[in-house]
Every structure is written in structure tokens, then in C-alpha cells.
Amino acid sequence: QAQAQPQQAKITGKVLGEDGEPLPGVSVMIKDSKTGTVTDDQGDYSISLPKLPGILVFTSAGYLSRDVNFTRAGNFTVNMSRDPQSLKDVVVVGYGQVRRKDLTGSVGSINIADLQKAPVKSFDEALAGRIAGVQVVSSEGKPGSSINVVIRGGNSVTQTNSPLYVIDGFPWEDPGSESANIINAIDPADIESIDILKDASATAIYGARGANGVVVITTKRGKAGKTKISYNTYYGWQESNKRLDVLSPYEFVKLQKEINPDLATTMYLAYTENGVKDTLPLDYYKNIKGIDWEEQIMRRAPMQSHHLSINGGNAKTKLAASGSYLGQDGIVLNSGFKRLQGRLAIDHEVNDKLKVGFNIAYSNSKTWGTPTSSSGYNNELNLLFSVWAYRPIALLNSNVDLLESPTDPEIEPSQEHRYNPIVTTQNELRQNFSENLVLNGYAEYAITRNLKFKTTGGYTRGITRGEVFNNSQSRGGNPSTNNKVNGGMTFYNNSSWLNENTLTWNRRFNADHNLTLLGGFTMQETRSSAFGAYAKLLPSEGLGLSGLDEGTPLSITSTSSVMSMASFLARANYTLFSKYLFTASFRADGSSRFIGSNTWGYFPSAAFAWRLGSEKWMKDIRFLSDAKLRASWGVTGNNAVGNFAAYAGYITPLDAGYSWGNQLNNGSYPSSMGNPNLKWEPTTQYDLGLDLEFFAGRLRFTTDVYRKTTPDLLLNASLPGNTGFSRQFKNMGKVRNEGLEFDLSGDIVKNKDFRWTSGVNISFNRNKVLALAEGEYSLLTSQYWGDDWVLIPGYIARLNSPVAQFYGQVWDGVYNYDDFDKIGDNYILKSTVPNNGQDRASIKPGHIKYKDLNGDNQIDNNDRTVIGNPLPIHTGGWSNNFAYKNFDLNVLFQWSYGNDIYNANTWALGTGYKFNTNQYAYYADRWSPENQDSKIPVAKGSLSKYYSTRMVEDGSFLRLKTVSLGYNFSPAILKKAKISAIRVYATAQNLITWTNYSGYDPEVSVRNSALTPGFDYSAYPRAKTMVFGLNATF
Amino acid sequence: CKKFLEKLPTDFVSPENYFKNETDVMTALAGVYDVMGKTNTYSRTMIFENDISDEGFNSLSSSPIDLSFNNFDASHGGINNMWNLLYQGINRANMFLQNIDNADLVMDEAKRKAAKGDALFLRAYYYFVLTSNWGDVPLRLKPPVDATDVNIGRTATATIMEQIVKDMEAAAELLPVSGTYAHNGRVTKSTAWGILARVNLKWAGEPLKNTDKFAEAKKWAEKVMDPANGHVLNPDYKQIFINHSADKYDIKECIWEVEFSKLSTGGQEEEGSIGVITGIPNSNKEFGYSYGALHVQASYYNSFEAGDLRRDWTINPFYYGTVGGVANSKVNYSASQIYNRCNAKWRREYETATPKNVNTSPINFPLLRYADVLLMYAEAENEVNGPTTEAYNAINAVRKRAFGLTLTTPPDPAVVYELTPGLDASDFRAAVRMERTHELGFEALRKFDLIRWGIYLSTMNVLGAQVNATAPAEWKLRASLAGVNAAERHLLLPIPSAEMSLNKALIQNPEW
């Protein structure tokens, strides 16, 4: 029927997701026109088609777009299905989300489903190798030990290089802190996404805290649709099969004979039978099996996890709740970690305009165990040193049970600090209880269709109770100590509140122009305090810490601190022709840590991306399905100094008093000269990136090249003694990090039955110090591991070199006979042969030899040079997912290449420096007149305390990090039991490590800092974990 | 917003808000004194490793590398800390002196004056220890301005000495007379005068050899000896040291001590290691644990005259053993066992405060005794006027007690204690030197004396050779090392390596 005026066809309807939930915000466009609309919060749309038939294009982030042909007006419901790639397509950035293809910055997204396959207590343990540019080094293998995440190299020299963690919108500057360890408080199974913001365009919106990168973590929230109940559990074992063998009883006694022949003979070989004195031959010990201390202290430790969650809701109200328990015993006796946690998130639409929601999380965890590596005053106090060095045998005919006896009866306590390690682990109570509470709420109000106001409020509270108890069998509390039975508790409190208010305005002018503006104001205040009390001479040991009140007070700790921050932020995203993307952001941060005119810092950024793939001429390149070029620049900051570092202060600590007439007077002194000029540490970063997709997205490639320059470092500078102060924060020095990142992933095989996706990433970072303090060319740093080593710098930061390099002597084997003149029975070192730091007269064949670099014929500090690089040349990971019918297999490799490790164990356990102290098995091969080819010095032949190349080892490794094999029961079978899905699996973590490193594990860095990375002394071994699990969804 | 971003420190006070009342002042003053009693000052290093002379040797170390063996370098931890601590004391005193005259300080004037005297004196004393050990050192009389104020060169020893004398003289004016306090932990006029005598003797000796200063030394010693000050010798030599152990004060003899004490709660934070690192070895905790690490040289033991009671107090004639089932019985050494014996001046069995800690003790250490003042007087008088009657009187007063003749029941009233009369100046000088080592053995003075007399190297080298030739094998190495190794560079300590690397204006001591 002809009509004079063709009536416009009005089409209305609803867009629903896979589970039948309404989808808001879906773009509805008329194909080949500039007309369109979006669905409202109910998923409803209404659009007039100028003519019929027509094609409507429905697109929404995370969903496969749909073209629907219409031939008539009316009400139509459209279902959209999720894009399998969808999780990778939406990226959570600061104060918003963007589609990956609209991204202008460099942001890495973790494949969370893969990460959740790793049986780990917290996500950071499974982060390594997954994202280019993210280097993860855990300090050691102890459950709950600190993990250092460094994004694109460290900028800071003396301060933390930890990224900012934004967890459900709440920023955490120090998430691994003693008082509020939020990372340990989150069950990895509760995480929805982890995005890592790397370049300045992405991080500048976090201003003063963005310079080390930002890790944005979002936990799971409710989804409309059928309510899902999931139960995920696994049970397994951890163990370390690597053993650092020590000398056998035979070799042990042989060594003692070399150190002190008379005493060794008296102790181990001489005996009296029927009143006749005789001496055993050394060979007697060839058949003696000594105590294997390492075997005694290591164990196969169980690990288990239970995670129950419920997720569901309707169009208006959505809910997610979960509770979990994780128990992880350590592989060293009496150590471990356990956690109980629960969380609840509710989102609700009050009306068309107003949305509210909140989430609440609580966790309770316990970490326990004697630290194996500590910065005590003597390196012999370390637990694993005691394990290796303890005598494997008691005296001949002795009835002393070394395993039971707290101290070795043959060592002089004033000269030797070793203590029975088994007794130590059984009698030293070292435990931390942590509670974390997180409350976050938001309200979002649509003022107009384009303008949204969002306000969020958050409150977090962390309480940690540290408990220490030394009973009468322990090293610190046995009857020979001053304090006898003693103990104490320390409470750490940390609370923080946050308020953020943002206005977002979005307008698509026509298909060519899309502009989003964001403006906001935020405030945050953090308070912390600690209180602790210690008591000694506790009369009732059995009461444990409850008996503290009966003892004699020893000390009280009481500290407090506060910091506040206020910020203004703004960002503009402009898209032209869907091809040219512009982003600019600006943040002004005010912090209470900086005073006067330095309070405020300003952090701008700008980025541009060109979607080459949308250019017509690119369409001709058939194999290339998409391409994007990105460029960004920005300035970010670092505010990592103490809350009151700018202020000078007088303190009155307990140990600063003085007595007059036997009356103690408290003493005070200036603790810091203060630095009112202290200001932000700014980092300027340039990034150039390219994203390519080939073969219709089957192969994806991303590369970034970046340069970060950080001048005015916040340096906790050492001051010379003449000032009366030891350290002071100053803005000085300059560091540069440059790097390259590659990430290649693809769907290699994509059949009906078999699918193989694989991704490999590799990153190179070069770190360089461009300036230190005025006129300073190098900065020497020592590692704290006991004794005089505290004063011997083993690390150097040199201009135009990386911030940390190993520094010491070049080991040159041992002196051999031809280095000596034989005079009578004595070997006198030839005058032309340099000494080794010891008195020339005391040097004998077989003693350690160093290279005389300055040619002055003597070894001293002037012969030190750079002897190793603790920073890797490249790190990376290779992940694979295989699916064959109902089976799935996940395999992740991780590597680090080119980094060196200081193996300080070599010094304590490979030099025969002390009588009755056992050594590593390889020490049997030391130099001797019969074994002149050996480079290992004789007993007591390397007494000078020098760091040398002898301690430096290659720390490169390739690790088969995670292997997870699962079987998914087919839905058909499960349907009857009203179960949606069941997956059973077996997973291994840290399965195989290929490395030349001789210590327990090459991923080690005890007491890690930017200046002292890659140090191993008595570090806790890394466990290999094998678990069996079940994943059920109802 | 501005107010929200202003967060003042919650855990410490700023200097502007300090020094408001007497409590603040006395707390800050205790902070200035605090430096005296640290491990690397008088608690250990300065009375042990850094005080090795011809009196004793370190028997503890298993390695031949140690400060006590004259085999160490500029990175040695003990001397690094000692340097840092002394400058911390100076900085604390500077802060104190900068604020003590604040207009808004409410405090009794006499107490304020005395406290100012304390700080002024201590700053000078710390400089005296610094310059005695290191020679030319950086001179700071005000706290550093800011964190860039770090490069400061060395000031000539003579200038440092002038400043020390000036400050000590000014302090003497401000300080109260001896007897004001019932203890000798705080300094008095007598302390300042006595130490001024010591400072001037050093100035008259090596390295400056400004012999005009002997007269100054004599003048200050004389001031202490003025009977109005009430200083007399304790009639019983050993009682001086028993008092140190038993927390008793004899302010007539002991003019100034480093105070170590047990907290009222039995804590050990303010304890030292007198009698612990030194003392007679004993592993019984209740009796008094001691490492007995400072053994004696045989030559020192043998240098005492017959009848000199100081020998068997300074050096233990016995060890603690079990006799007839009784632990801690005193068992005499055989005559040949000399090197086995220790510096036994301070003995833990006399400690009264309990519980006795293993690694620390509350035993005080004397810094200035009246006997020292008398001997300084005798030395200075001899240098100025020769061996006069006054010089003889002073040395004989000390000797009289040494032979027990001031005891209520002298061991042998007929014994001749006087120094040979009629000595010439040179022989008298030698006699005073001998007397000092006998009277003041192990009181952190001998190495200092040998250096200022210019005979440290010769004495030590001779000793080293002699020990090597005669000592039993068991003791040979440890007893000889310090003497054998002693060389020109050991007259001064090296500037600590940490200071050298951070303070660009410094030049290292020669030969280091």
C-alpha cells in the first residue's frame, strides 16, 4: 500500500545476555548510517528505522556483535552471546574501563582463569612470567614471605619499587605491609581481573603513586541470571627434593683433623679400652652414618584449600558471596600459613538513575615459623646455617644425643652461635595473626544520559598481632640466657579511609567523534600505630604468652603515624573516526608527607593511538586483521618516604639514657635533621607500542619500547659520621630504565576436539644510574647478614651502570707450591706474588688467591671491581592451554636470564673456617698436597672477609612453573544431578627448574631492596607443590 | 584542604617544641652523656680493643685480624662506630648548646648553668678523644644546617686543642664544685680541671710537643689538689674497684666515672662490659660470667716491685676452679703461668645488683682518679721545675698506698715505699712513667701515654720481639701480634672508610 508519507518503523525491545539478564549500554546502530542509540539500564532500546527492511548492529564490550535484519516494526528481543575473547577485551584502568582496542596506553591483563589454576595462597605467587615487563621475585620460599613485583625496572634507589595496588578501587601503597597485608588476605579464586598499568598514560591518573606502575585488581561481583554456587577445593603436598649435601662423618672428621689435629684426634679418634689408650684409624668413619640434619628439618607438608561461592541476582540486584579456607604448612618444620576469609558484594539499582553497591571482605590469617634467614648480629644465628653446619656425629663413645640436645656440648657458646635447629623450630614461637577488614561502597547517579556522577567511600582496617615466645629450651630463653623464659606481643594497627568523587561525561557527536571527560576529587587518610610489650623471667612457662604479666617487664613499643592525601584528577578521551584515539590526563596530588610549597605535585600525561587496522589501505593486507600504533608520554610520581621524613625531631628511645648516681635518666637526641625541601620523585616515561592481529585475530602480537627517567630521587642518603646523623632523605640522583617488551599469543590449533592456545612474552629492561649525590660516582651498600659483613659493601651503584652490581674481589683459585720459596720446612710467599689480604707470613699453599687488579702486589679494598650483575637481561614466560575433548591442560614456563646471585652460603659452608663446623659436601674436594688441581681453598685458608667471584653464581633459570591437567564432566551426565559443571584436576607448581645455581632455588633475594638484590644466605627452600582438586558449579 | 594536608609528627617532638623545661633539658643532657657508655666507646672498644698496649693482649680472637692486634683497616666496624658515636655526642651537645639559652626555657638558673657546663665539657672531651685517636679531625661547633652540609675538612690538631681548652675552661666556670653530687657520674669543676691537666700534658707531648703546656697541666692539677676540694686517695687500692662493681661512689678518689647501671627492673640497656669482656674468666652466671679476654703481658706482671699490692689486684694470681666440690674456689696459678692471667681490676663477684647478666655488667669505669691527678702533677712539675719535693710528695702519696701503708693495718709498716730520692729529671720521668702503668693499668690510659711520650712504637716492637722469643707456644701469637705489627701508622687510627666515602673534603691519615 502506497503511503504519502512513509511512516518511520519504530523498533523497540530488550537486549539480553546469555543467562537471560538484561544488558544495559549496548550500542544499537543502523548499519551504514550514523544513527543509533544505546540500551538503558533495563536493557531496553527504542529506535526508529527510516526505512524497512534495515539492519541493526548490536555491539557491546565483551559480547560478540550481532547484525539483525528487520523487515517490520515491533518489539524484538535480541540475545547476545559473550565473546570468548571478552575478558581480554575490557581493561580496567584508573577510574574507568576501556575496550582494549580503544586503549592508548600500555596495559597488561592477566589471564585470570590461567592464574587461578595455580595452587597458591595469593595471586602474587603466580604472577611471574605472565605479563611482559612485570618482574616478580620472591625473597625466599617460606609461606607468606614477601614478594617483590617490579614493573619495567626499579626507579627508586633506596625506597620501595613496589607498584601501587588498586583493589576494588581502593589504593594500597604498601599492600604487603606488616600491619595490613591485603595481598595475603585475598583468595585468588575471588579475583575477577588483574590489569597491570605500565606506561605513564595509564598510570598518570594515579599521579604521585603511579611511577612504579599500578596493579588494578577487581574482585568478583554478582551477575544477573541463574544463581551459581561453586565449590572449589584442592588438597596436596609440598616438598623440596633439593638437598645441599654436607660432608659425611668421614670427611667431617678428616676436615677437623686438618683444622686442629690434636683436638680432633682426642675428640673423634682416641679411646680407652680396658685401660689401654688407642687411636682409631680415620677410615673407621667411612662406615658411620651421621645425622642428616637437613632431612630432619625438611618435611612433606600438606596444603589444602576450600572455596565456596555463590553468585547471582536479577536485573536490579546482584550478589556475590564467598568464603574460603586455605592451609599451607611449610616444608621446614613448624612453619606455615593459614587463612580464613569471606566476602560479600551487592549491587543494586534503586531506579533508572541511581545505582548503589558495596562490598565487604574480612580475612583472618596466621603465619608462623622461625625465619630461616635473618639479619641477626651473627650469621651463625641463621636457621639453615645451623642445619648444614651442625656436627653429623657426636664424640666417640659419647652418649649425647645431638638431635635432642639444645646446644652442641663441644662448642663454646661465647665463640659460636649455632643452636640445635630442630630444637629451635620446636621451641621458638614466632607467629603473626592478621585480620583485615575492607568496606567499599559506591553510588552512581546519572544526572543526564551523558553525565554521570559517582562517589565511592572505602574503609580498611588491618590488625596484626605478632607473637614471640622463647621457652626454656629455645636459644633465646634457655636457662643460660639473661632473660630466661621470655616473650612478647606487638599489635600493629592500620586504618585508612577514602572518598572519591568523579563526574564522567560521554558524548558521541556522530560516528566520527566520541568524547569522554572525567573529572574528580579524592581524599584519603591513613593512620597506623603499633603497641607491643615484652617481658622476661616468666615464672610459669606453661602459660605461654598468657603468663607475660607474671614476668619482669622488658620493653614496651608504642608508635603512631598518620598521612593524608587530597587529589584532583581529570582525563579526556577523544576518538576521531574510530581511528585516532587521544587521551590526556592530569592529576594534582597534595600529600601531608611534603610540606610548604612542596605539598602539591602535578602529573600530566598524553597519549595517541592510531588504529591502522581501520585504514582502508590496511584492508588489503589480508593476513593482518588489525593494527594499532600507540605513543604516550607522562609524568608520574613516587612519594615513598616516611610520613614525617620532612620534619626534624627529637626522640627519647629506651636505649639512649644515662645513669647518674645509679639513677637512670631517659635520654633524648635529635634523630633526624629533617628536610623541609623534600618533594615528589617524578618519573617521566615515553612509550611506543604496536598491537597487531593476524589471521582474523588468531595470532596477536604486542610490543612496547619505553624509557623512564627519574631525577630528584627520594634517596635515604647516608650521611658521614661528622654530621652526627646516619641518614637523611634527600631529593638527589637520577635513574633511567629502558626496555623492550614482546608478547605473542595465538590460537595455534582450533578444532572441534582439540584446541591449543599459546602465549609467550619476553621483556628486556636496562637500568642505569645517571646521577648520584653531588660529585658522587658510586654508592656502596652492604647486605645485613651478620658480623662484620654489615660493614663490608658487596654492592655498588655506579654512574652509567645498573643501580645494583656485585662488588668485590676477583677470585683466582688458590696459591700453589710454585708461589712459594721453600726455606727449610717453611713455605714463604714469593715477594713477587701478591698476598690475599692476610699477613704474607701466614699465607700457605692452598690458601685463597685473588687477582691483584691494581698491581701493587697486595690485595686490599683497592682491588675490588664489579663482579656480577644481579639484574636479569631478560625475563619471560610461556603459557599454553590445551583442550582435548573433556580434558584441559595448562602449562606455564617462566624464566629469568642473565642475572647473578650472591651465594653467601659459600663463605660459611665452603671455607672450613671453624673447628667442629660442618661444610657442604663439595668441600671434600678442597686443595691438598694430593689434590693440587683444586681451586677450593684449604681449611682456614680464606679468612679475609671479602666478597669475591667465588660467591657469585649464574642465577638464570627456566622453570616449569605450573602444570594443571583437568577433566570436565560432560554436562549431559551432570544435568541429572543438577550440577552445571564439574572439573577434577591435578596441578603441580614449581615442578621442574633448570638452572646452574647450586643453592636451593635461583629465585631468591633475602632482604631484597633495589640496592641489594639477588642475595642468598640460609634462604628458605622453594617447595614443589602437587595438588588434586575438584571444581563444582551448581 | 590545606588543614587536612597538615599532619604534624605524632611520634616525636620537633626541636622547636623542645627545651621548654628542666625535664627536657635533663633528658637531652642524658642523651649527650649516653654516648659515653656504648659498646664502641667505654663499654668495650675504648677499654679493650683500642687500648692494647704493653700491659695486656686480646686472647679472644681466633683470627690474627683485629684492631687489638694492630692488624685492621679503615673499614673496621669498631672504629667506624667509635667515630660516629663521638660525633653523635658532639652533635647532641651542639643541639643542646644551641637551645640551652632559649628565652622560653623555664628552669632553675643554677641547674641550667651546670647543665650547660656539662654539655660544653663533654663536647670538648669528645673532641679530645677524637683528636687523640685520629689527629686532625673535622670541627663542628654547630649542628649541620641541612643534608648537603656534609663535606667538612680536617682542622689542625693544634686548633682543636685550643678549642678543647677554651671550652673546658669555660665549662669549669659553669660547673659546680666537687661534692655537689653524691656520685661522680656528672662532671664537676674538679673533673674539668683534672681533664685539662691531661689535655695539656697531651699538648706538651707527641705530636704537637708544645712544652709550654706542662706549666698549664701543673696549674690545673694543682687546682684539683687544693684541699678545699676534698680530694684524697682511698686508703685501700682494691676498694676503688670493688666500689665500681658494687655501685658505690668514692667521690674523693674517683673524680669522674662512666656510669653503667642496671635498670630498676633488672634490665641491661644501660650496662657495659667492664669485668665481662675483661675480668677473670668464669662461666657461672650467678657468680658473674666473664670472658676474661684481656690477658696480661708477662713483662707487665714482672715490672711490679716486691710488696706492691697493686699487682695482685690488677692481675689475678688465681683462677676460679672447683676445689673439694666447691665451685668458684680460688686456685692459685703456678709461677710460670703469667700469660694465663687477666686484667682483674674489676671483678664480677663483687657485683651487688642482681640478676647478673651474661654479656653485660653494671660495673663503672674510672675516667679520672685523684691518683692520676697526683701523677700528672708529678710529671708536669718535673718537666717544669725538675724533681722537686712537691713532685716527690705527689708520687710518694700514690706509692704509699700501693704498698699498703695507708691501710688501717698495713701489711708491713716498715716497708720502704718512697721513690729513690735524688733522682735526676730524666730518671724521675722514667719513674713517673712506671708509676703510671702500675697505678693506672688497664684504665684506658697506657696506650695514650705511650703515644704522647713518643715511645709507643719502640715499646711495642721490643715487646713483640720479646714475647716471640720467650712466651709459651700457647700464647705466643696472640701476645706478640700487637707489638710485632705496630708501625708508624698505628700512632693514629685511619679515618673510617664510611666517612671517607661520604665526606669529600677529607684526606686520609698518612700510610692508611
Image (cartoon, coloured by chain):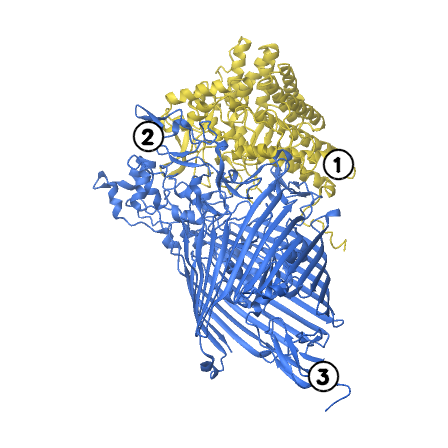
Chain colours: A blue, B yellow
- Which of the numbered marks, if any, corresponds to residue A817? 2
Residue B60 picture quarter: top left
Check the image and report above or below for B346 versus A129: above
- Say if mark 2 contacts mark 3, CB within 8 Å: no
Which amino acid type corresponds to the residue marked 1 in the rendered image? Asp
Q: On the image, numbered disc 1 is attached to which residue?
A: B108
Horizontal arrangement in the rendering, residue B466 relative to residue B1 (left or right):
left
Residues at discs 2 and 1 both on one chain: no
Separation of residues labelled 2 and 1 (CA atoms)? 76 Å
Per the image, label 2 sits on a secondary structure element best described as: helix
Instruction: Where is residue A391? Give x, y as percent.
Output: 35, 46
Horizontal arrangement in the rendering, residue B420 relative to residue A13 (left or right):
left
How many circles with numbers are drawn on the protein?
3
- Which of the numbered marks, if any, corresponds to residue A828? none
Q: On the image, numbered disc 3 is attached to which residue?
A: A10
Check the image and report above or below for A195 versus B461: below
Check the image and report above or below for B146 versus A107: above
Which of the marked residues, 2 or 3, is nearer the chain's N terminus? 3
Residue A839 picture quarter: top left
Q: Is residue B356 visible?
A: no
Quarter of the figure that contains the N terminus of chain A: bottom right
Q: Residue furthest bottom?
A: A1
